[in-house]
Amino acid sequence: QVHLVQSGAEVKEPGASVKVSCKASGDTFTTSFMNWVRQAPGQGLELMGIINPSGGSTTYGQKFQGRVTMTRDTSTGTVYMELSSLRSEDTAVYYCARSPDVGVFDYWGQGTLVTVSS
Amino acid sequence: QSALTQPASVSGSPGQSITISCTGTSRDVGSYNLVSWYQQHPGKAPKLMIHEVRKRPSGVSNRFSGSKSGNTASLTISGLQAEDEADYYCCSYAGSSTYVVFGGGTKLTVL
């Protein structure tokens, strides 16, 4: 059974950065891609980007290029998502989700609420 | 505006069947059999219900089924139960540059 555990809620001021972590259980860490998906209040799901934990390669959504950085620590089985230059529109729940295959997300973290407010 | 179009809401009575549509284009739904569906209860993370158009992950009730015709995919829930009340999102692979696109979500109400 795969388990993804994310870090806790954050409150940030506009212009700051936030770094969210997602720790994976089991030996799944380097065998599947990991994704970051966000959901603004009352809104739908939006893919931010993907990281291959095995080699560390990343692909970011065009909307987030230049502001998002995804990294991983293979020693702890943890992936990270850092979003910079935060603005109020970035207030959302951020999820990590595993992709065992192209275009499908089979396991999700519990979500991390990031609130951007002055 | 989401890339895939879903109805904002659908409703049905317990025991009935409902179908949620998900309309894309020839660049996503129409080109790949890589449509998935997610159920999301309030305050919870999404849960995978269907992948590759019609495949059910282990543990998902066979009351949930998926299909596709042209640029439109569909999720059918038969024998509606109160616990099915949730938001449902479709998702499609859209090629190596876009990767995936989501629908805007459909709120299912069990009357």
Image: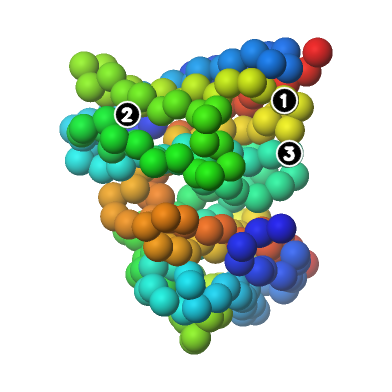
Residue B111 screen position, x and y as percent? 77, 67
- What's the residue type where badge 2 is placed? Ala
**For the residue marked with disc 1, what is the amino acid?**
Arg
- For label 2, the crowd category at 10 Å Cα-Cα, with few meaning under 14, some 14 to 19 and many 20 or more, is many
The amino acid type of the residue labelled 3 equals: Pro
Residue A5 appears anywhere in the view: no
Local packing at callout 1 (Cα closer than 10 Å; few below 14, some 14-19, many 20+) is some
- Residue labelled with disc 1: A87
Which label's residue is closer to the chain start, 2 or 1? 2
Quadrant that contains the N terminus of chain A? top left
Image marks 3 and 2: residues in contact by CB distance under 8 Å: no
Mark 1–mark 3 Cα distance, whole angstroms, equals 14 Å
Q: CA distance from mark 2 to mark 1?
A: 29 Å
Q: Secondary structure at mark 1?
A: loop
Give the number of the mark in front: 2 or 1. 1
The residue positioned farthest toward the right in the image shown: A118
Residue to which mark 2 is pinned: A24
Residue name at image x 41 percent, y 23 percent? A80
Q: Which mark is residue A41?
A: 3
Q: Earlier in the sequence, mark 1 or mark 3?
A: 3
Residue A101 appears in the figure: yes
The mark closer to the camera, 1 or 3, is 1
